[in-house]
Image: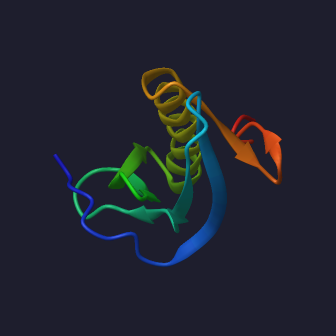
Amino acid sequence: MFEVTEIGQIIATRSLVFIRESGSSENVVINIGAPYEGETEGCCCPYKIISETRNKLHGAFGIDTLQALDLTMKTLNCELEYWERTFKGKFHFLGEEGHCCKF
């Protein structure tokens, strides 16, 4: 299994604020790296979620770079929704509720 060890060239960034039900908040930055062909299997699109409490580097894999990018966007949506449920809060983007990762 291929392991993602670096994000490479960043092609997209989104800054969010996560506001918990308690009223506390933290800034969250999402970076998406340029999709690339793997050495042995398919293509990868790396992404990184950075906040005060989390620093996660991961990637989504597809048969080509477009599918890898598409799967990264879908995975990010799931991760952010999971974060909202688990840590009981909501993401805000440009002062409004939502993280805008759905397509």
The residue lying toward the viewer, choosing from 65 and 85, is: 85
Which residue is depicted at the point 36% across and 52% down? 53
Q: Nearer the viewer, residue 25 or 63?
A: 25
Q: In this view, does 22 lie above or below 94?
A: above
Extreme-top residue of the structure: 85
Image coordinates for residue 19, horizontal then vertical, percent: 61, 40
| Residue drawn at the location 53% of the way across and 62% of the way down | 32
Image-based side of 56 in relation to 28, left or right: left
What percent of the width, then of the height, locates residue 50?
Answer: 44, 60
The quarter of the picture where the C terminus appears is top right
Q: Which one is nearer the viewer's eye here, 17 or 72?
A: 17
- Furthest residue in direction left, as rendered: 1
Using the rendered view, name the quadrant where residue 27 is placed.
Answer: bottom right
Q: Position of residue 26 (x, y in %)?
A: 54, 53
On screen, residue 34 above or below 51: below
Q: 59 left or right of 18?
A: left
Image coordinates for residue 33, horizontal then vertical, percent: 50, 67
